[in-house]
Amino acid sequence: MALEIKVPELSESVADATVAEWTKNVGDAVKAGDVLVILETDKVSVEVTAEADGVLADISAPAGTDVKAKQVIGSLDSSGAPAAAPEAKPAAPAQVEQPKAAAAPVPSEAKPAAASATPVAQRVAAVHNVDVAQVPAAGGKVTKADVQNYMAAQNAPAKPALQPSSVSKANFTVDIAAGRREERIRLSRRRQTIAKRLVEAQATAALLTTFNEVDMSAVMAIRAKRKDSFQKKHGVGLGFNSFFVKAVIGALKAFPVVNAEMQGNELLMKHYYDIGIAIGSEEGLVVPVLRDADKLSFAGIEQQIKDYAGQVKEGSLPLEALMGGTFTITNGGVFGSMMSTPILNPPQVAILGLHAIKERPVVVDGQIVIRPMMYTALTYDHRVIDGREAVQFLVKIKELIEDPENLLIEG
């Protein structure tokens, strides 16, 4: 019986996808639940699995094809059950003893477990017939980048040819004579979408950025005092994210237009607070959303951000986590940025940029003192938000961070 392999339903904000790779070839035996194909959407990767045991009969949408929801991209022959492995014939007694003496089998437990690799890394390794146990991990787990670096190292030429020549492949060109290397890589669908949206944001909105600086002394003192008990009680660290999420909510309540959306000649005022947190990944920035963040505790915010970060790293972030969002926070400070101008995440009308905390001399009550200071930046759509409101919004955040007790009331 032939079963159609279809693109699953995508979210309302994702119109189509691209076939990233088929993990099986035509004629391969598969079992129900096996991943057949990986689709790449604007936001996350989507796995399409086999609905039954059988044989992959047809691939009508090869890698690189753009597809839409419910489109048929292949078929599975469920009548062709996977062939069972042939039983080994009993060997003669004399033949059995000789292999035992020749070499002792290596116990399977001695091989490193594939669980030490992220799911994405395991899929890439399986597609390219790479033993993931042999791939060195740059961090705690083997990642997709580790697998790609391992494959590149394995395929690197040992020595340059004696005669000048040029070796060309589909996406790779090497000038052996000069020892200079170029590589052509197709942009991932996510990177293409990021590029498109960033250009659209600058072309359709009147972008302007205003800056301020925040004294982080009070927040850092609270963290130093409470971090151990907070970790023990909630099982998650007390970071800066929760303080700024609460401060942003307090500022949004004071200046509701910053939480709005422009639709033609109308403003859609949103009286809920879905705060997007920008997280870097191997394939580009993603912005999962904290739903109803005003109802979350400090621990709830920290735990959800930690969960999102883990899902982004492993490539398991659900598409639903990226839907919506009324305001975004991005923190370039984790990479050492001192100051930047973040770009809007449409259709939102503002985004807050955080930066590195640095000790600097500042004047307090007429005295020069050393304080941990952070620059903050608010990029906003000037069609919706006036400069006065933008400046006051940042000042409100500054006040709440420098006097964290107010976060309990206003955040």
Image (cartoon, rainbow, N blue to C red):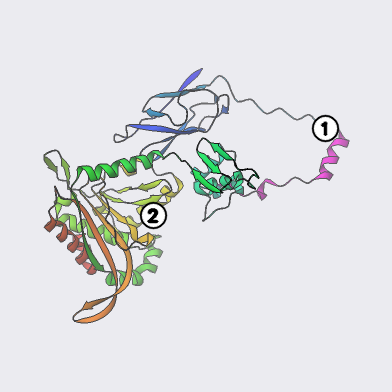
User: Which residue appears farthest toward the bottom when viewing the image?
Assistant: 367
Q: Amino acid at mark 1?
A: Ala
Residue 303 picture quarter = bottom left
Is 181 rendered above or below residue 372?
above
Is 328 rendered above or below residue 231?
above
Along the polypeptide, which appears first: circle 2 or circle 1? Answer: 1
258 or 160: nearer the eye?
A: 160
Residue 385: horizontal and vertical position, in percent? 14, 51
Is residue 102 highlighted in magenta? Answer: yes
Residue 405: horizontal and vertical position, in percent? 22, 68
Distance CA(mark 2)–CA(mark 1):
56 Å
Q: Is residue 202 left or right of residue 153?
A: left
Residue identified by numbered label 2: 306
Residue 325: horizontal and vertical position, in percent? 26, 46
Q: Which residue is located at x 33 percent, y 47 percent? A: 288
User: Which residue appears farthest toward the right when viewing the image?
Assistant: 94
How many C-alpha atoms fall within 10 Å of the one at disc 1: few (<14), some, or many (≥20)? few
Q: Which residue is located at x 16 percent, y 60 percent? A: 391
Q: Is residue 176 left or right of residue 373?
A: right
Q: Which mark's residue is nearer the viewer, 2 or 1? A: 2
Query: Would you say residue 344 is visible in this rendering?
Result: yes
The part of the chain drawn in magenta is: 92-114
Q: Which dot marks residue 91?
A: 1
Q: Amino acid at mark 2?
A: Lys
Is residue 303 highlighted in magenta? Answer: no
The quarter of the rendered structure image containing the C terminus is: bottom left
